[in-house]
Image (cartoon, rainbow, N blue to C red):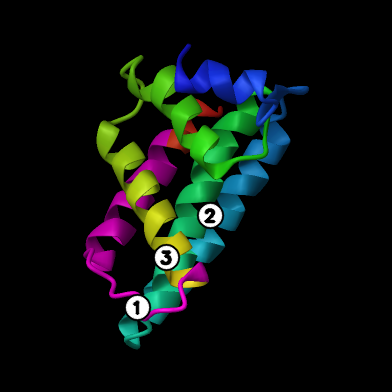
Amino acid sequence: MTELSDCFERKLLTGVNPSTGLAKKSLIQAGLFLTDAEDLVKIGKQRMGTIALYNAFFHVARALLFKDGIKERSHFCIARYIEEKYVNAKLLNRDFLDYLDTLRDARHETQYSLDFAEIEMDLHAGIVVCREFMKVVDVLIK
C-alpha cells in the first residue's frame, strides 16, 4: 500500500466536488501569506517568516486539491497527493514538493517545540521557489 492510498483509506483525503473557484481563492491566500513571509524575513523575524512561508506553500498545494475535488485532513497527505499526482507525472518540479515537506517540518518545530527552533533554511530562496510554484499552479488550475 502506498502512502497516498493509506491517506485515502484513513479518510485523511476524501473526494468532494472539484472547484476552480476555491482553487483560485486558495492561490489568493497563498499570495497574502507570501507577502507576509517576505515582510517578516526582511525585518529578521525568521520564525514567524517560516510559518507564513509554509502557509503560502500549503495554500498553493491546496489549490490543486480543490481543483481535483480532494478534501484534506492531513498536511502530510497533501504532500503525498502532490507527489503522486503532479510530481511523479512530471507536471510539477520536485523542488516545490521538497520545500513543502521541509517547511512543514520547520513550521511544526517552530510552532510546537518548547525549545528554541533554529531556522536552518534559506527563507529568501524559499520565497522565490514559492512564487514560481504559484505561477505553475495558476496555469494548472485554469
Residue at point 50%, 26% (across, down): 81
Q: Which badge, 1 or 2, is on the more N-terminal residue?
A: 2
Whether label 3 touches label 2, CB < 8 Å: no
The three-letter amino acid code for the residue at tag 3 is: Glu
Q: Which stretch is magenta?
A: 112-136
- Packing grade of label 2 (10 A; few <14, some 14-19, many >=20) is many
Image quadrant assignment for residue 117 = bottom left
Residue at point 28%, 71% (across, down): 119
Q: Which badge, 3 or 2, is on the more N-terminal residue?
A: 2
Q: Would you name the residue on which mark 1 appears?
A: 46
Residue 39: x %, y % from top left: 41, 79
Q: Would you name the residue on which mark 3 appears?
A: 109
Image quadrant assignment for residue 19 = top right
Q: Residue furthest bottom?
A: 43
Q: Would you name the residue on which mark 2 appears?
A: 30
Compared with 17, 123 (above or below) is: below
Secondary structure state at the residue bearing disc 1: helix
